Image: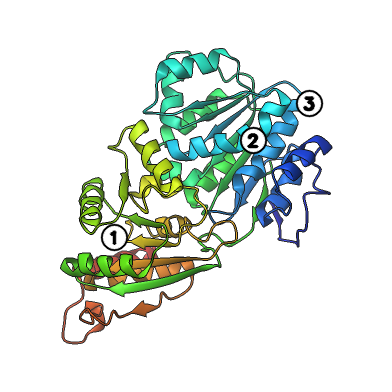
Amino acid sequence: MTQLHQRPNTSFDGLGIAPRILEVLDKLRFTVPTPIQHKAIPIGVEGKDIIGIAQTGTGKTLAFAIPIIQGLAQKKGRALILTPTRELALQVNEVFDKIAPLFGIRTAVIIGGASMGNQLRALRRNPRVIIATPGRLADHMSQRTVMLADVSVLVLDEADRMLDMGFLPQIEHILRSVPKNRQTMLFSATIPGPVVKIATTHMKFPVHVEIAPSGTTAERIIQELFIVKKDAKKQLLGKLLKQYHGPVLLFSRTKRGARQITQLIRHMGHGAAEIHSDRSQSQRKEALDGFKSGKYRILVATDIAARGIDVVGIELVINYNLPEDPENYVHRIGRTGRAGHEGRAISFATPEQGGDVRNIEKLIKSALPILDHPELPRERFTYYSSNRPPHPRFHARQRNKRRRHKR
């Protein structure tokens, strides 16, 4: 696996991009490539396989869209892009829509929760680019309404998230169905073991482009932590929503929690919408569009939306509940501080969650600053106190660590 290191970037010139695409980028006012774009585009244009690691909000979509469009404009074939969520698929399609039609390249979005009839009509128009979630694409494959024999480029976008969501069987089926003689590009903020296995099994001498170490959070995000009892979270939330006046993205661990928090925020007098897997595609689209337009100042989401929300200008991300998987912390807070903007992420942890916070800190390789609110009682993690026993999960984690060490 070839390793490339970051170099300074000043413009899209010299990256192997065709003049006509450069003209389009100029018109769209894309003047300075992000680090991942600067490194990945020349490799993609050459047709090589890529493993791209960069924190969210760094422009990964354009990094693979430009090589795909340039390649399809010159030769036959089709591109297949897999994403974990419907929202991310739609946002990837928005990027392609800015450039692809100028070259006569049609796209089709194949996602769950949307009309199969509309998708069938889009497929009959012979799209050169298919953007899909694995589950719905597998449905079309079983009904033989989509053929993948002419796929020349395959992109796995947010590959680790797709595996977290249980899509490994569908992904393996898709990988077996596309031609072996193809270009494969894999992008993500983190590269855990299962993703490495896919890379080594299904990619040809991939070039490894790591803009930031796996698990690194965006530099322009201020991260803060409140230790707060569960029954005081509502009070703290109300005070923070009065303190910050810009767009807020709030994460709940469960769908039921997201519904309850949304109602709570509305009762506080703020405009809020919810987005999670129990909402229909039209409801999720209305919530996201309303958040982008300012109709809703606050969007409450579960982790299914952690990588599907590409909104510039989110002032604050609130982790009302810590994520079950520490890696999701990176993806959640990556929704703020996008496209060079500054951002802030505030997390709520109960006194029993010291171990969960420690796991996050280990992943991001830095300590989360702990704040006290002047109007709330000061709390500390229970296992830091000599008079109180540690949380039961702390002992379980310690036992698991010792077992792993013995192996």
Label located before the other in sequence (3 or 1): 3
User: Which label sits in the foreground, 2 or 1?
Assistant: 2
Distance from label 2 to label 1 (Cα)? 37 Å
At 78% across and 26% down in the image, what residue appears? 74
Residue 143, horizontal then vertical, whole percent: 43, 13
Judge by depth and name the residue closer to the eye, 405 or 186: 186
Judge by depth and name the residue closer to the eye, 136 or 384: 136
Residue labelled with disc 3: 74
Distance from label 3 to label 1 (Cα)? 49 Å
Left or right relative to 353: residue 116: right
Distance from label 3 to label 2 (Cα)? 18 Å
Please, what is the three-letter code of the amino acid marked with disc 1?
A: Asn
At 19% across and 71% down in the image, what residue appears? 229
Q: Tell whether label 1 touches label 3 (CB within 8 Å).
A: no
At 33% across and 55% down in the image, what residue appears? 251
Residue labelled with disc 2: 98
User: Which label sits in the foreground, 3 or 2?
Assistant: 2
- Tell me the crowding category of disc 1: few under 14, some 14 to 19, or many 20 or more residues within 10 angstroms, Cα based: some
